Image (spheres, rainbow, N blue to C red):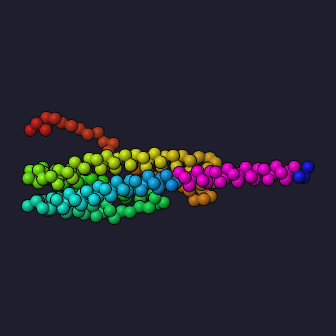
């Protein structure tokens, strides 16, 4: 009788051990998927930063180009590249900081492209046209990598917060991570008045 009880206890311990190892390995695998997706996001933003550097250098060559616009873009680019977040530290505060810096870069880049409209000679150069053509491709890559990152975050967070994995995850330091949210103000209704555009 004692031997049977011991075998039952050993069997339960073995099952729990197997379940624990399997669960832990699943969390590690999903955590690595999140890190890979985050690295892809950073790569896309780096591609944009590189393109912006080339755009700025091309625009600098134009005579009498508005210096404040260039300065704003250069400063926004420097700030965007200085916010470096590790995939292990994806807190709401860090994601918001990263997103804010990238949003400033987007705004400065939009102002640069709008200002370029007043320089038809610059707009007509092959180098500028090629850079301008690449920009939507890069922005699309950023959008897609952010969506994939949010999908990986969702799978990871669902796993790490579900019972009983939340207990095991807590024991080994796995916690929920933050994904990208819409930019501030994106929820506001945009009024388009075509009468104003005709004036």
Q: Residue at x 89, y 52 (%)?
A: 3
Q: Position of residue 94 (x, y in %)?
A: 41, 59
Tell me the chief SS of the magenta region. Answer: helix
Residue depicted at 37% across the width and 46% down the height: 144
Residue 76 among those drawn in magenta = no
Please state the horizontal and vertical placement of residue 92, each as a whole percent of the image: 44, 55
> In the drawing, does residue 56 fall left or right of residue 4?
left
Q: Determine if the magenta segment contains residue 27.
A: yes
Question: What stretch of residues is rendered in magenta?
Answer: 4-30
Seen at 33% across and 48% down, the residue is 141
Whether residue 96 is visible, yes or no, is no
Tell me where residue 93 sits by quadrant.
bottom left
Vertical order, 63 against 4 (above or below): below
Is the C terminus in the top left, top right, bottom left or bottom right quadrant?
A: top left
Give the x, y percent position of residue 167: 63, 53
Q: Determine the residue located farthest toward the front in the rendered image.
A: 126
Q: Nearer the viewer, residue 194 or 12?
A: 12
């Amino acid at each position: 009788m004692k031997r049977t009880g011991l075998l039952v206890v050993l069997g339960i311990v073995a099952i729990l051990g197997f379940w624990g190892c399997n669960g832990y390995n699943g969390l590690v695998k999903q955590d690595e998927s999140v890190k890979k997706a985050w690295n892809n996001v950073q790569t896309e933003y780096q591609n944009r930063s590189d393109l912006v550097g080339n755009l700025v250098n091309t625009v600098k060559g134009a005579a009498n180009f508005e210096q404040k616009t260039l300065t704003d873009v250069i400063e926004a680019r420097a700030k965007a590249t200085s916010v470096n977040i590790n995939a292990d530290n994806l807190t709401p505060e860090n994601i918001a900081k990263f997103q804010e810096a990238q949003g400033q870069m987007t705004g400065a880049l939009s102002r640069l492209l709008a200002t370029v409209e007043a320089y038809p000679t610059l707009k007509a150069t092959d180098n500028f046209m090629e850079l301008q053509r690449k920009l939507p491709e890069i922005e699309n890559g950023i959008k897609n990598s952010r969506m994939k990152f949010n999908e990986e975050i969702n799978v990871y967070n669902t796993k790490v917060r579900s019972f009983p994995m939340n207990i095991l995850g807590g024991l080994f330091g796995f916690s929920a991570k933050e994904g990208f949210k819409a930019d501030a103000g994106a929820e506001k209704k945009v009024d388009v008045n075509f009468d104003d555009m005709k004036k």
